[in-house]
Every structure is written in C-alpha cells, then in structure tokens.
Image: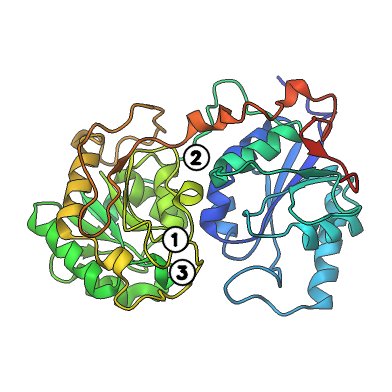
C-alpha cells in the first residue's frame, strides 16, 4: 500500500465548461498519483464533469467573473468565501489549467492570498510573484496533452499502465432509456450555436440516418427539449432533458457512434470509448479540440471564413461550414466508424479501448468540406514533447530547463 503521508495536497483549477474539465482528466490522474488528496476547483458548468473523473477526491465550485459565456458579477462576498474555502483546504500545490487564449493570473492571485504554497500554470503574461512555475505551452498541442505537459513538468507523472486517454468513472447501464437494440447517438445542441448544425439540418441528418437503417437516439439537456423533439421527429428516440451528465455517459457508452459537434458530449463520448463523427466548426482549431484518443471523422470545412474567429454565432450566412456537410458524408463517417465499434459492443463495453490503429478508409473531402477520417489522436501524442523534461529529469517542482520560476523571465 502506498504511503501518502508525505505527498502534497493538490488543487487543480479548471474553471470553464464540462468539456474542458473532461479534457483535464489525464492530467488529473497524473496529479492524483502523486498527491495525498486531489481537489478540483470548477465553475458551475464543470462541476458534474469533475465528479466523474477518476482520481478526484473533492470538488469545489467557484463562478469566476472572468470565465464563461455569461460571467458572474464581481463580488466581494463570493471572493471572501472562495478564499475561506481554499485556506481551509490547506493545499500545498495548485495547477491552474487554462486554454491557450486564457490567463491563469486572476485565480493565481487568489490562490496566493489563500496561502497555497506553490502554483503552476501555462502563462503568456508576465506573472510577477503569482506563479512559482510559469510554464511554456508547446505549439499545436491538443488541450488534453497540454494539460499533461504541465502536470509532468510540475512533477506529476501518470501511473504505470495509464497511457493517458480520457476516462470517467464507470457509467450506468441506460438500457431502460435507450432500449436494447444497437443505436447511434445524434447530439444536435451546443452551448455555442456556431458549433452545431442548424436545427433543420440536424433533423435532416437524423432522417437520413434512420432511412439508412440506423436506430437514432437524440440527446440534449433540459433546455434543449424543443430542439431534440424537432430533430428526432418520428424517426428517432428523443431523450432530450431525460439524462444528467452521468446518465448521458451511459447512453454514449452504449452507442455504436456519436454524431456531435464540438461540445462537451463529444469529449464525454471519447471518455467512454465511443467513436465520434465530429461536426467540427473551425471557429476554434481542431488540433486543440478534436475528439481525443478515439477513432473519429472530422466533418466540416476547416478552412471556412469563420476559421479561428472564436465566434459564438456563425458570421457567415447559411452556416456553410457545418450545414454544408452532406447526408452522404455523415452516413459515410458513421459507416466507417461502426466498423470499429461492432454491434456486440452495444451497452456492454464499459472499458476504455487503447487500440492505436488508424481508421482504414478512403473518405475524402466532399462538397461540405469533410476532411476525411482521422485516426486516434490521443494517448500516443502525450509522449510527443521530446524537448520538455519529464518528472525524472526535474530536481524539484518547476526546475526543468524549459520552465521559469516567478519573475525570472
């Protein structure tokens, strides 16, 4: 049995959405393997995802006024409460996980005020005394890999046998919701409209899948019931509003393929090992946000006019990057992915697969801009940062040659 008495109490901060928290999962497991207690500080939209991550002992919530689509107002009372909670946690170390365009410095300041002894984060901004490890993010890194890079350079390594895929705790059997026959999940919604098919286009995709012989299960949150009812129509099973995040994990785990945009359920599907037909709007780069560690097909014109704009609403009339994807492309993607997900695996395989073989298909871009079939971008990429030291090369947290400490810029 491992003696954890001298291991640190560690806090991992990821303040944005459920998908972001799920992508932090491999880094969380690395931290947990080297900590006596691992807590996550999340925003309201990430709390339920954090509760699904292996290795998390405690989940704390803070609605940060610098994060989210509708940020909370700045509040002295909320800030005092957070400082009290963090102080009571007696954390020795903290890792702040942010996307490439975000700053970790506001929360780093609060961590210092709460007495957290040592803090690490990727930061493009000069941190002064706020960070003990100012980490340099390597270019073109997937979000999951970038988080693992930070954890490793902070002295935390994945345990033996863990190759770094996304994971969640064992999802429930949801046969009572889906039925026992094989099915394909179509998740039409997204928090950001630019990253989803239009409702009309999603309904046509559902009809095309049903006409091809697939049993279609349409999923969505409580606020998306009107959308899921429209998309399911008379040819799909409408589960809109009937699942929480854990139950949705069960539904996705039982699916042969998930057809979904760049949104949290895409990463949840990857975490339960389900292949993803990814309707990926290029408003953010696929190299950072594509489904991680599972076979997937990237659908959508990645060179569209909206590329890299981070637009919430499509700035191009007609939403061509996604609505231009043809039914034939969707059907081809689902068929290719179903070959990697046999019918017998329906609602039975709850174990994460680690097959690294690329999908063998001749899919090519069509009129809608599908980029063809992608392989399993994932666990093998974790070890790709040859020029960044691992924990065995570091004499203490933040001491590697590619890192900076405090104000030594």
In front of the other: label 1 or label 3? 3
The correct choice, above or below, for 14 with respect to 291 in the image is below
Can residue 4 be spotted in the picture?
yes
| Residue depicted at 74% across the width and 52% down the height | 123
Q: Position of residue 66 (x, y in %)?
A: 70, 70
Q: Seen in the image, is 329 located left or right of residue 254?
A: left
Q: Seen in the image, is 284 located left or right of residue 91?
A: left
Q: CA distance from mark 1 to mark 2?
A: 17 Å
Residue 46 in which image quadrant = bottom right
Q: Position of residue 383 (x, y in %)?
A: 57, 27
Q: Dot 1 corresponds to which residue?
A: 244
| Residue depicted at 34% across the width and 26% down the height | 357
- Tag 3, which secondary structure? loop
- Tag 2, which secondary structure? loop
Marks 1 and 2: CB-CB under 8 Å?
no
Q: Position of residue 78 (x, y in %)?
A: 78, 73
Q: Indicate which disc, 1 or 3, sits on the residue closer to the N terminus.
A: 3
Q: Dot 2 corresponds to which residue?
A: 167
Q: Indicate which disc, 3 or 2, sits on the residue closer to the N terminus.
A: 2
Q: Nearer the viewer, residue 403 or 342?
A: 403
In front of the other: label 3 or label 2? 3
The correct choice, above or below, for 383 with respect to 285 in the image is above
Q: Residues within 10 Å of mark 3 (few under 14, many from 20)?
A: few
Q: How many marks?
A: 3
Can residue 236 be spotted in the picture?
no
Q: Dot 3 corresponds to which residue?
A: 191
Q: Seen in the image, is 360 located left or right of residue 83?
A: left
Residue 388 in which image quadrant = top right
Q: Position of residue 395 (x, y in %)?
A: 84, 24
């Amino acid at each position: 049995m491992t003696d954890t008495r001298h291991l640190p109490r560690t806090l991992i901060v990821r303040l944005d959405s459920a998908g972001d928290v799920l992508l932090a999962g491999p880094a969380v497991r690395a931290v947990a393997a080297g900590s006596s207690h691992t807590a996550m500080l999340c925003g309201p939209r990430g709390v339920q995802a954090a509760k699904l991550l292996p290795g998390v002992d405690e989940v704390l919530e803070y609605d940060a006024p610098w994060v989210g689509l509708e940020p909370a107002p700045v509040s002295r009372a909320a800030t005092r409460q957070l400082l009290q909670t963090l102080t009571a946690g007696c954390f020795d170390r903290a890792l702040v996980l942010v996307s490439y365009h975000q700053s970790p410095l506001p929360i780093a300041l609060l961590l210092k005020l709460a007495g957290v002894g040592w803090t690490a984060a990727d930061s493009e901004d000069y941190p002064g005394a706020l960070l003990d490890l100012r980490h340099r993010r390597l270019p073109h890194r997937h979000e999951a890999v970038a988080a693992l890079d930070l954890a490793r350079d902070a002295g935390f390594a994945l345990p033996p046998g863990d190759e770094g895929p996304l994971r969640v705790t064992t999802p429930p059997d949801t046969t009572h919701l889906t039925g026992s026959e094989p099915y394909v999940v179509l998740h039409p919604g997204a928090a950001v409209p630019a990253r989803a098919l239009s409702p009309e286009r999603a309904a046509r995709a559902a009809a095309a899948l049903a006409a091809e012989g697939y049993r279609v299960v349409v999923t969505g949150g409580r606020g998306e019931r009107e959308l899921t009812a429209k998309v399911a129509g008379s040819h799909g099973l409408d589960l809109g509003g009937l699942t929480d995040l854990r139950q949705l994990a069960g539904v996705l785990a039982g699916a042969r393929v998930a057809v979904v945009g760049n949104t949290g359920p895409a990463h949840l599907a990857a975490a339960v090992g389900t292949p993803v037909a990814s309707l990926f709007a290029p408003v953010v780069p696929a190299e950072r946000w594509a489904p991680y560690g599972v076979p997937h097909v990237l659908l959508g014109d990645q060179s569209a006019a909206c590329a890299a704009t981070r637009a919430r609403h499509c700035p191009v009339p007609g939403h061509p990057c996604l609505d231009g994807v043809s039914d034939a492309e969707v059907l081809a993607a689902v068929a290719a992915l179903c070959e990697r997900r046999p019918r017998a695996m329906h609602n039975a395989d709850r174990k994460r697969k680690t097959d690294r073989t690329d999908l063998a298909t001749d899919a090519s871009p069509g009129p809608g801009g599908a980029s063809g079939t992608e392989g399993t971008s994932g666990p093998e990429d974790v070890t790709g940062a040859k020029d960044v030291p691992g924990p065995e090369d570091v004499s203490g947290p933040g001491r590697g040659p590619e890192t900076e400490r405090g104000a030594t810029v």
